[in-house]
């Protein structure tokens, strides 16, 4: 069993700060020291920045096997502390993801409520999240990929996104998976929503 991630390609980029060998080595050792066998890390990217108020920002994005992306960031008064705190967040999310995968006995299909809604309100209640943290949404996260609904849930849990747009691998239709205030998930079938709008318009017109 793999207990450490070795020989991981790690890219460390600086913005408004010169990356020293010490910073780079610290970030690489922390990432390679993530003592988890799943999900397997394929590539890691680190962004270090110093804001105008001298706050040190560290963001880490892990690209893992099975199309999993895990990301987190921290701002503090010390760059090394920001890296360490971000690694701690990453590790918690990896453990959370692995725990969900191991609970295969739990019926997942009942967690989804099919909601052919015509309008999607983007105001998601983020206060319901157990660990609210600022996230940087990357362009890669908006790629519409073919996923089964369970895979979409696992992807969203790994990154704590508010919603995910994906192509349902079973129906080949575009869907939006989002968090509900009660802690469960809702899914909007875009095709069904469009059909509902068309039907409603035709009835009113008749």
Image: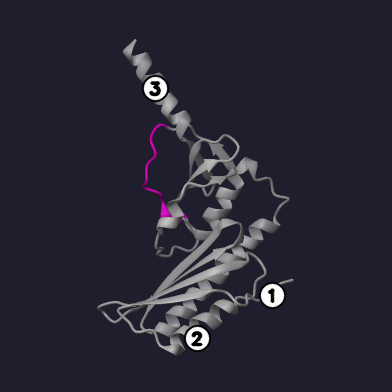
Q: Main secondary structure of the magenta part?
A: loop
Does dot 2 land on a helix, a strand or a loop?
helix
Q: Verify whether residue 132 appears in magenta.
A: no
Q: Is residue 90 left or right of residue 196?
A: right
Asked whether disc 1 touches disc 3, contact meaning CB atoms under 8 Å apart, the reply is no
Disc 2: which residue: 25
Residue 69 on image: x %, y %:
52, 61
Counting other residues with Cα less than 10 Å from the Cα at mark 3, is it few (<14), some (14-19), or many (20 or more)? Answer: few
Name the residue: 33% across, 82% down: 17
Q: Quadrant of the C terminus?
A: top left
Residue 151 on image: x %, y %:
59, 49
Name the one closer to the observer, 9 or 126. Answer: 9
- Is residue 136 at all visible to an observer of this figure? yes
Q: Which residues are magenta?
A: 118-128
Q: Earlier in the sequence, mark 2 or mark 1?
A: 1
Disc 1: which residue: 3
Q: Is residue 49 left or right of residue 2?
A: left
Could you say which disc has been placed on residue 198 in the image? 3
Name the one closer to the observer, 14 or 120. Answer: 14
Name the one closer to the observer, 99 or 142. Answer: 142
> From this viewpoint, which residue is outermost toward the top?
206
């Amino acid at each position: 069993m793999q207990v450490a991630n070795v020989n991981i390609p790690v890219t460390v980029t600086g913005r408004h700060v010169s990356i020293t060998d010490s910073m780079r080595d610290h970030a690489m050792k922390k990432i390679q020291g993530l003592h988890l066998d799943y999900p397997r890390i394929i590539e890691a990217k680190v962004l270090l920045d110093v804001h105008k108020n001298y706050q040190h920002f560290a963001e880490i994005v892990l690209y893992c096997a099975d199309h999993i992306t895990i990301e987190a960031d921290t701002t503090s008064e010390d760059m090394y502390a920001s890296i360490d705190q971000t690694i701690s967040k990453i590790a918690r999310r990896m453990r959370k993801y692995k725990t969900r995968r191991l609970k295969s006995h739990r019926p997942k299909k009942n967690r989804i409520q099919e909601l052919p809604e015509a309008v999607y309100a983007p105001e998601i209640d983020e206060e319901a999240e157990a660990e609210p943290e600022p996230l940087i949404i990357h362009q890669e996260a908006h790629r519409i990929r073919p996923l089964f609904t369970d895979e979409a849930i696992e992807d969203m849990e790994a990154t704590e996104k508010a919603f995910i747009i994906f192509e349902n691998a079973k129906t080949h239709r575009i869907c939006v998976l989002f968090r509900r205030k009660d802690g469960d998930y809702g899914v909007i079938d875009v095709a069904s929503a469009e059909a509902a709008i068309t039907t409603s318009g035709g009835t009113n017109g008749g």
